Amino acid sequence: MFQVFMRHRELLSELTKREIKSRYKQSILGYAWVILNPFFQMLVMAFVFSHIMRVPVIGVPYALYLYVGLLPWTLFSNSLISSANVLVNNASLITKIYFPREIFVLSTIFAKIVDFALASIVLVLFMVYFRVPITWNIVWFIPIFLIQQIFTYSVSLLVSACNLFYRDIQYVLNLGIVIWMYLTPVIYPVELLPDKYRWIFQVNPMAVLINAYRQVVLSGSSPNLVSLGVAAGVSCAFFIVARWIFNKLEGIFADVV
Amino acid sequence: MLSNVVISLDHVSKLFYKQEQRTMKELIPALFRGGKGGNWFWALQDVSLQVKRGDTVGIVGSNGSGKSTLLKLIAGVTRPTEGKIGTSGRIAPLIELGAGFHSELTGRENAYLNGVILGMTRKEIDAKFQEIVNFADLWDFIDQPIKHYSSGMYLRLAFSVAIHTAPEILLVDEILAVGDEEFQKKCLSKIGEYLHKGGTLLFVSHDIKLVKQICTHIVHIEKGKIIRSYENPQGKKRS
């Protein structure tokens, strides 16, 4: 994996740039949409869930609470959705030139990470405005983010390869992501769910990760290391399996696309 | 592999699966009907071929004979079902020029993107950029999005990038049938220059006359099998 990455890093960066540059061409606000989109989404949701539905959140303003969960979730869902189509959209390259196909999936995820970084600027401003105290536990952000990316990459590999064979996958995925979001404490706190359903959060790596982000960013505490360790283990195992399957299928991509 | 052999195919066969259903909605009824959901066929059967450095090999055959599959196998985009393929050096496929071009990006951006896709580094492209644009004769348009290009300009840029990757092996598939006559001539003379420097060419075409003009070795494929393979002394070693 690392070798592939090093040998093709220029290709990877060109493909990532292509994706970023081409996306908001011929729009007035251009790349600002990357920041505006999640921001407005957050405003709408914050209004609905704190003024109409009244989700109880302890300690921090709901908008902030929501944003810390929504940004990594958006990164995850956008990565999956664009991965589903990345091989299909690059059919003309896949049938002509050989290089490891996972470069396509990597480049699309990298582009989403750039979006995430930009959108996070607003979050940082929010945190300054609300004077959220920052502790050294914020450093935990890095391993949590890495685990999320390993998990995202694994799911993306499978989704992109499967969609090449049957285009139903992208529709199943869209539906799946909506359901998955409600099974993850993005818009509501974990405490809101009755105890007998809490196990859902234990087996859902995204739930563990979103919780961990909130703990290290908003509460300034350290994350639940046992849950995080399990999420890391599951992600790595999944990564090995997904990559093995992807590499097995890769040889016939050009034949089916 | 011998040191001067740059492409070697050893009893290569390719079995294709023709998938007829693209969605599960189509697949599931097909399964109930007892359909196979597609059918298998041999696109290539037991093909052996060796190409030495500096060879110009023409591949002829009618539509669906397996020519393009052969090129795809050599380019490495698909794996053989049986047999072995070895290639050495950078391969530039001049197959469907401009694969990977993005219409919203400028000519300059696309030249870099395409160059990197074909295996160059950014530095190598920097060094050759002048030459690439000169050949394509596109200085006036290089910083415009290529969606404003005419199809001729598009082809010129794509061909220019591909030929300047300094490939070990050039795979050419019918491309000379496109573009205006002047550009065709320019391409042919550029390919001639490339051959003169000792490059290897694999040329796929219906146009037996053109193949005989260029190639020193001709392989005739029908129905996935080599039916005839012969030297063609008239094919000029462009020197």
Image (spheres, coloured by chain):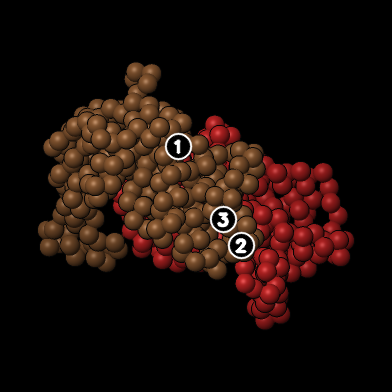
Dot 1 corresponds to which residue?
B194
Q: Is residue B196 above or below residue A192?
A: above
Q: Marks 1 and 3, Cα distance to the nearest angstrom?
A: 19 Å
Type of residue at label 3? Answer: Asp
Q: The residue marked by circle 1 belongs to what chain?
A: B
**Colour chosen for chain A:** red
Type of residue at label 2? Answer: Phe
- In this view of the protein, can residue B42 be seen by the observer? no
Dot 3 corresponds to which residue?
B137
Q: Are marks 3 and 2 on the same chain?
A: yes
Residue A131 location in percent, x, y?
Answer: 87, 61
B35 sits to left or right of A200: left
The residue at the point 69 percent across, 52 percent down is A213
- In this view of the protein, can residue A165 be seen by the observer? yes
Dot 2 corresponds to which residue?
B141
Among numbered discs 1 and 3, the one appearing first in the sequence:
3
Mark 1 is surrounded, within 10 Å at the Cα level, by few (under 14), some (14 to 19) or many (20 or more) other residues, namely many
**Colour brown maps to chain:** B
Q: Is residue A102 above or below residue A89?
A: above
Residue A77 location in percent, x, y?
Answer: 55, 60
User: Of residues B85 and A230, which is closer to you in this image?
Assistant: B85
Q: The residue marked by circle 2 belongs to what chain?
A: B
Residue A114 location in percent, x, y?
Answer: 66, 54
Q: Is residue B87 above or below residue A231?
A: above
Type of residue at label 1? Answer: Tyr
User: To which quarter of the image does residue A59 belong?
Assistant: bottom right
User: Of residues B55 and B69, which is closer to you in this image?
Assistant: B55
Q: Are marks 1 and 3 in contact (CB under 8 Å)?
A: no
Q: Secondary structure at mark 1?
A: helix
Q: Secondary structure at mark 2?
A: loop
Q: Are marks 2 and 1 on the same chain?
A: yes
State which mark lies toward you, 2 or 1.
Answer: 1
